[in-house]
Image (tube, rainbow, N blue to C red):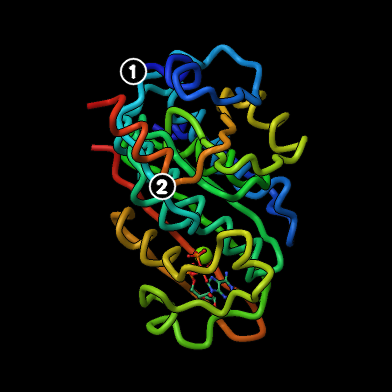
Amino acid sequence: MKVNELAQKLDMKILTGNETLFKDITGVYVCDLLSWVMSHAEKGNAWITIHTHLNIVAVALLTEVSCVIIPENLAVEENTIKKAEEEGIVILSSSLSAYELCYRIHELLA
Amino acid sequence: MSDSIINLSYNIPANDFTFAGEASSNVKKMLSQLGINPMVIKRAAIAMYEAEINAVIHGGGGIADIQISPEKIFICIKDEGPGIPDVEVAMQEGYSTAPEYIREMGFGAGMGLPNIKRYADELQIDTEVGKGTTVKITININ
Ligand SMILES: Nc1ncnc2c1ncn2[C@@H]1O[C@H](COP(=O)(O)OP(=O)(O)OP(=O)(O)O)[C@@H](O)[C@H]1O
Ligand SMILES: [Mg+2]
């Protein structure tokens, strides 16, 4: 499943306007400890995190996740979105909790 | 074959999270352009990122020097911060002195140095309390 399909199926907002929406999602990784994410997230994972500051862009870039999903409608800083767009990172926003997101994405990827 | 060595240098600003990870991201792009194996790039990028972030958070900023040769990637991150009193303790998973506001940003799991060790082929940490810390990371390309 591609990032854009997932966004559509789960009614998520695409916060970044860029053309990297067509990456394949290989699974989900949920964690808010950045150095843990750095060593455990796998390429293509959709990464769910409650962090919204700039550094999520660097982590997403270096781990090559397919997108970052911010749960529970948390507001994302403008400079994070801008940086993500520059680096070709997609940030999605959802009203669902991390748990609900995992559950729904699991169903969709199964 | 000194002409096939690429040297890169970056300034790492202190406590400035706006650019934290910028140097590692740039090096990663350069390595991709050179067509280096993606697994090797990932290891180099993660190890460098962790050292870079440590320089930002703990070291009061510093300098990153990178040499890319056909055989290996050498990364040197140098700061003039407080130094590490006990490197063996600092290397343990979960050990962190990061203050609360840093932890709230998602840093401070105490996984940075263990990550570097895991991904580097060679790791050397030279540190002196009150003087600073130099982290040297070597990643073999083949
Ligand atoms: N450049 C440095 N200067 C001074 N102290 C350092 C430096 N790098 C690491 N340390 C010390 O070693 C500890 C462990 O570092 P490590 O990178 O493993 O964890 P962390 O930075 O605290 O958390 P994380 O990397 O998981 O976000 C730090 O908390 C700090 O006390
Ligand atoms: Mg660290």
Side of A54 where B34 appears, left or right = left
* Circle 1 or circle 2, nearest the eye: 2
The part of the image, by quadrant, that contains residue A108 is top left
At x 48% / y 30%, what residue is drawn?
Answer: A67
Position of A66 relative to B16 (above/below): above
At x 76% / y 37%, what residue is drawn?
Answer: A79
Report the disc number at residue A1: 1
Quadrant containing the N terminus of chain B is top left
- Find residue A3 and report its horizontal and vertical position in percent: 44, 20
- Looking at the rendered structure, the secondary structure element under dot 2 is helix
Chain holding disc 1? A
Report the disc number at residue B78: none
- Find residue B55 and report its horizontal and vertical position in percent: 61, 63
Position of A26 relative to B89 (above/below): above
Residue that carries the numbered disc 2 in the rendered image: A99
Which sits in the foreground, A76 or B8? A76
- Label 1, label 2: how far apart the Cα atoms are: 19 Å
Amino acid on which the number 2 mark rests in the picture: Tyr
- Find residue B16 and report its horizontal and vertical position in percent: 75, 55
| Residue B7 visible from this viewpoint | no
The part of the image, by quadrant, that contains residue B89 is bottom left
At x 56% / y 58%, what residue is drawn?
Answer: B77
* Disc 2 within 8 angstroms of ligand 1 (CB): no
Side of B142 where B124 appears, left or right = right
Chain holding disc 2? A
Quadrant containing the C terminus of chain B is top left
- Find residue B121 and report its horizontal and vertical position in percent: 28, 55
